[in-house]
Image (tube, helix red, strand yellow):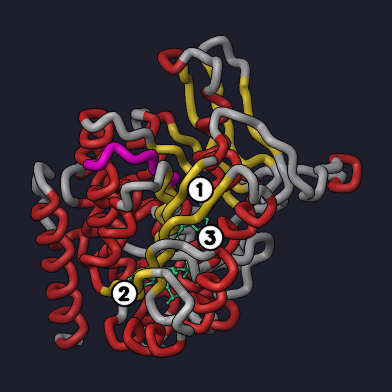
Amino acid sequence: MKYISILGSTGSIGRQTLDVVREHPDELKVCAITGNNNIELLRQQISEFKPQLCCVMNEEKALMLKNMLTADVKTDIVSGMDGLIEAAEFEKSDIIVTAVSGMIGLKPTIAAIKKHKTIALANKETLVTGGSYIMNLARENNAEILPVDSEHSAIFQSLMANDKKAINKIVLTASGGPFRGRDTEFLKTVTIEDALKHPNWSMGKKITVDSATLMNKGLEVIEAKFLFDVEPERIEVVVHPQSIIHSGIEFADHSTIAQLGLPDMRVPIQFALFYPKRVQNSYKSLSLTEIGNLTFEKPDMEVFKCLRLAFDALDAGGTMPAVLNASNEVCVSLFLNKKISFLDIGNINEKIMLLHTPQKIDSLETILEAEEWTKKTIEKHLHSN
Ligand code: NDP
Ligand code: MG
């Protein structure tokens, strides 16, 4: 039996992780779950999975959830960052699925690493902001990091039984999002509803907007650089609208190994939970003849400048990727609250990066200070406009 904590069990990845648990009740057991606002769903998850611990980030909602539970429920309800860390460090858990969205995932992930836990990493913001600091910490603590993001899972799988020192390039595929092929003129008028219509994947709002700006692919470039220790020049982003080839690696001998599958996040989630075992499930089989065509294009980094900014942030190094990530989190939230336009996201990210002098990351504090600096600088920028 493998015991797991799911940070963000009410979100898209969290719910799909629970689906994987449903599929394998004799092999997987959930010990701890966490959410932020969705206490009705947490109540249902407690009743179905009977975890020992449940953290509700929002303290008021934690009290409300306690009042909703019947006396026979044995789950401990905790709240706030301390509660989230308790779920991440939960003694009985072998694997921690980090499925919260945003930089909030950083502290609990660090806590889990320090307790030598295996991390099933969905929260890409952790590696984007913490980079080599997180990777070194994981190495020092013998904590394995297994990617859940479909592209990184594909790269990880393509590396299995292959020579890690003989990578020519990583081929990172992207669906292109709902605005693939569009120009800047078109993007001036797009709405939140347009941005939330992803062609292939059903995901949380933040990452869906990031997929529309191609910031998601940018964050994934940064994530790939740190996870696989490959220079950015060796990461090629290829737009592949069908999302069947989830990414791959070209090796020194010009042989490319890639991983294919239908777009279903439960597959990479299951892979991380059972690694290195391959186990049966009831999911749909891939039929290449049904798919018919697989096509590929170059991404347009002028129109979708967020992708270019990710490469620029890696070039600048230090805290620059953390600043780009923090700026983007603020901008996406402003966009979702109708305070800025779709194109403003990339434009503000670019301005904030120009104002930042990158610092070397040697502690969690450096990353959190960069986040604080970014938030304040965006506020000043918005007031002066
Ligand atoms: P969702 O928005 O669907 O879910 C986010 C989860 O985090 C929810 O459980 C939410 O709680 C919780 N949460 C949100 N804000 C806070 C906070 N401040 N403190 C504590 N918990 C919080 O996101 P996704 O599942 O789509 O994405 C999660 C992560 O996985 C992201 O980092 C994303 O980039 C990554 N990812 C997602 C993929 C996908 O297919 N969805 C694919 C690859 C990576 P509540 O709902 O209760 O408010
Ligand atoms: Mg992805």
Q: Is residue 312 above or below residue 373?
A: above
The residue wearing badge 1 is 149
| Residue found 39% across the figure and 30% down from its top | 228
Assign a secondary structure to mark 1.
loop
Horizontal and vertical percent for residue 58?
Answer: 31, 80
Quadrant (top left/top right/bottom left/bottom right) for the N terminus: top right
Q: Are marks 3 and 2 in contact (CB under 8 Å)?
A: no
The residue wearing badge 2 is 57
- Tell me: 344 left or right of 181: left
Q: Nearer the viewer, residue 294 or 220?
A: 220
| Residue found 59% across the figure and 68% down from its top | 48
Badge 3 residue CB within 8 Å of ligand 1: yes
| Residue found 62% across the figure and 42% down from its top | 246
Is 116 a magenta residue? yes
User: What is the span of residues highlighted in magenta in the rendered image?
Assistant: 114-120
Residue 258 placement: quadrant:
top right
Of the four image quadrants, the one with ligand 1 is bottom left
Q: Return the mark for residue 199.
A: none
For the residue marked with disc 3, what is the amino acid?
A: Ile
For the residue marked with disc 1, what is the amino acid?
A: Asp
